[in-house]
Amino acid sequence: MSSQESGSRASSVLHDRRGSDCRSVEVQMSGGQDSREKTLSAFQGFTTCNVSDALDALGIEGTIAGIGPLWPACPKIVGFAVTLKMSIAGREEVVIGSLEAVDAAMPGDLVVIDNRGRLDVNTWGGLVSLTAKKRGVVGTVIDGATRDVDEFQELGFPVYARGTVPTSVRGRIAIEDQGIPIQCGRVVVEPGDLVMADRNGVAIIPRRCIEDVLNIAGRMVEIEARITRDIETGVHPIEAHRRHRYTDAVRLHNVKLDDE
């Protein structure tokens, strides 16, 4: 099976979890830089928890378990997915293929690597991180392990992974393909999807749902703020939750404020 066929199969398996009912217009990877920067800036105000709640409200499975920051102060990252898929029988040497992907990236992009969760071999390194940072790539998320953590930290280049390992990638795996749908955990990631990673984990927003998730996350944060204000002014926490119907907002996919 070709990598394209494999990616298409993975995408179709979880298609119903990728927001087929989203109403928003896609934010194009090749769209105006101002539009991209505006979108990324808007999401900086949220956490992956906020995004996860909005994805729940849309019936989308978009959070990846087990991938986290590689050092305590690793910054949160938000960017548009550039995808790489690795395998033992890949077609291209990892270092060169990774540099090619980074060279084609745009400012605000974020590299997402599918190495099937392997923890015994590296997938990313300091030199490609340096190149990525110079290109304006905001960070890397890896379904697998990596090394050169000290270099990432010195560069100020955020990397999220399942773990670390000193073992070189050379002669062990190769790049199967890039710019195709990949799968990280249970989540399909397609080029141009919005990716957020912070200390809570990783969330993937299908590109056609970016606007919907942004709007819903904002409303849910406002509901949480209203509940917080009520509790601080003496309202019983259970009453505060019932008053603002936070749980119903998630369960019923219907996020509204009381004054709407």
Image (tube, rainbow, N blue to C red):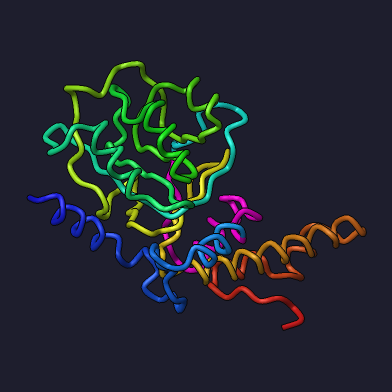
Picture coordinates of residue 167 (x, y %)?
A: 30, 17
Q: Residue at x 18, y 24 (%)?
A: 172
Work out whether residue 178 or residue 195 is closer to the camera in this orientation and state it. Answer: 178
Picture layout, residue 111 above or below residue 94 = below
Left or right side of 228 for 163: left
Residue sitting farthest toward the left: 1
- The quadrant of the image that shows the C terminus is bottom right
The answer to whether 111 appears left or right of 151 in the picture is left
In the figure, 21 relative to 143: above or below?
Answer: below
List the single residue furthest toward the bottom. 260
Instruction: Using the rendered view, name the quadrant where residue 217 is placed.
Output: bottom right
Is 179 within the magenta? no
Magenta region, residue range: 42-65
| Viewer-closest of 70 and 253 | 70
In the rendered image, which quarter is residue 62 located in? bottom left
**From the viewer's perspective, is residue 158 above or below residue 207?**
above
Seen in the picture, residue 16 relative to 193 is either above or below; the reply is below
Residue 143 at x, y percent in the picture: 35, 38
